[in-house]
Amino acid sequence: MGFNLPEHWVWDFWLADDGERHHLFYLHAPKSLGNPDLRHRNARIGHATSTDLREWTDHGLAFDAGASGSFDGSATWTGSVVRDRNGLWRMFYTGSRFLSPDTAANIETIGVAISADLFTWTKQPGPICVADPQWYETLGTSSWPEEAWRDPWVFWKQADQLWHMLITARGKDGTEPDRGVMAHATSPDLKEWTAGAPLSETGSGFAHLEVFQVVKVDGRNHLVFCCDTAKLTGTRNGQVGGVWSLPVGDMPGPVDFRQARLLVDERLYAGRIASDRDGAPYLLAFNNVSNAGVFMGGISDPMRVVTGEDGYLALEAGQ
């Protein structure tokens, strides 16, 4: 079953839990575009809810893209949702601005929208966080066709009284295209953000590291992310991409992505782990490609996640 829209492609998504309902925020674009590759430059964020992670009620568009030429004037891409100290929900999302209809060149930055109830959103002036060329590759400084600064994952750390943001980015140094890194930014108040040095090094075999999530399973932190086969490089050439994970210590902290292992292959993508009302962890992902390599779309039913004897995440046997 999962979540599907008959007239739209559905792919990347993220979740928020208000204690009664799971809120799904998903990227979608109309199938009337004809070519599914065009979905990226036409993506919008939709909203659906569920009490069990299986049966979903769609609520349509969360909010629209910005005016032409603005930081999110082409498309609104993947993000995450947190609740601030005043009880307001803040959605940090990626704004994409394509420079031409004929090229893949685009600049990605981070924006934010605010809601009291997870249904009605008000976008704030943006962008609120951009790639700092001191540490990160920017458009035109390499052969990479985009300025990668997307998929913000935001969380609070009590120990340092700061909000932390993990971001898909590329380091400015290292052998191309093996420059995928986890970028890091901090904020005391969710309003003013400062980009810092990456938490990982280039050369880990990933040209990009997408849709980060830090999740605790069986008392240990795990980092979940994605990289498709086409973007594996260096020591990972010849491997199959998909949803990856690795156990990590207290975050934020240094991450060695050379230790990452494949959780599910790229028939599924943009995986997120959510807990049901009993606290059991489940993986959801979007249906990426068929056996024939054709893009499918739509979000899977939840799959039970366990911790293997080696400490890595795995799907429960039989799924």
Image (cartoon, helix red, strand yellow):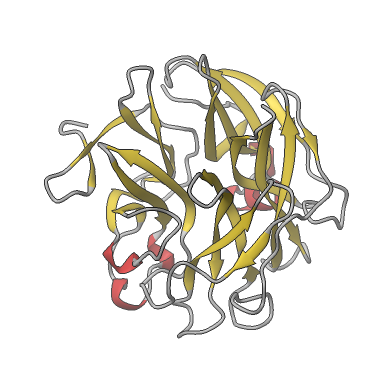
- On-image quarter of the N terminus: top left
Place of residue 69 in the rendered image (x, y in percent of width and height, measured from the top left): 86, 58
Q: Is residue 296 left or right of residue 72?
A: left
Question: Residue, x 73% and y 29% (percent of image)?
Answer: 115
Place of residue 95 in the rendered image (x, y in percent of width and height, measured from the top left): 72, 52
Place of residue 274 in the rendered image (x, y in percent of width and height, measured from the top left): 41, 31
Q: How many marks?
A: 0
Question: Residue, x 66% and y 75% (percent of image)?
Answer: 138
Residue 83 vertical position relative to residue 186 in the rendered view, above or below: above
Question: Residue, x 37% and y 22% (percent of image)?
Answer: 276
Which image quadrant is residue 316 in? top left
Place of residue 121 in the rendered image (x, y in percent of width and height, measured from the top left): 76, 30
- Choose between 58 and 51: the one closer to the eye: 51
Residue 126 vertical position relative to residue 146 in the rendered view, above or below: above
Which image quadrant is residue 156 in? top right
Residue 152 in view (yes/no): no
- Choose between 241 and 108: the one closer to the eye: 108
Q: Looking at this rendering, what residue extends furthest in the left direction?
A: 309
Q: Is residue 53 left or right of residue 121?
A: left
Residue 16 in view (yes/no): yes
- On-image quarter of the C terminus: top left
Q: Is residue 300 left or right of residue 265?
A: right
Q: Is residue 74 left or right of residue 288?
A: right
- Choose between 155 and 145: the one closer to the eye: 155
Question: Residue, x 78% and y 43% (percent of image)?
Answer: 65
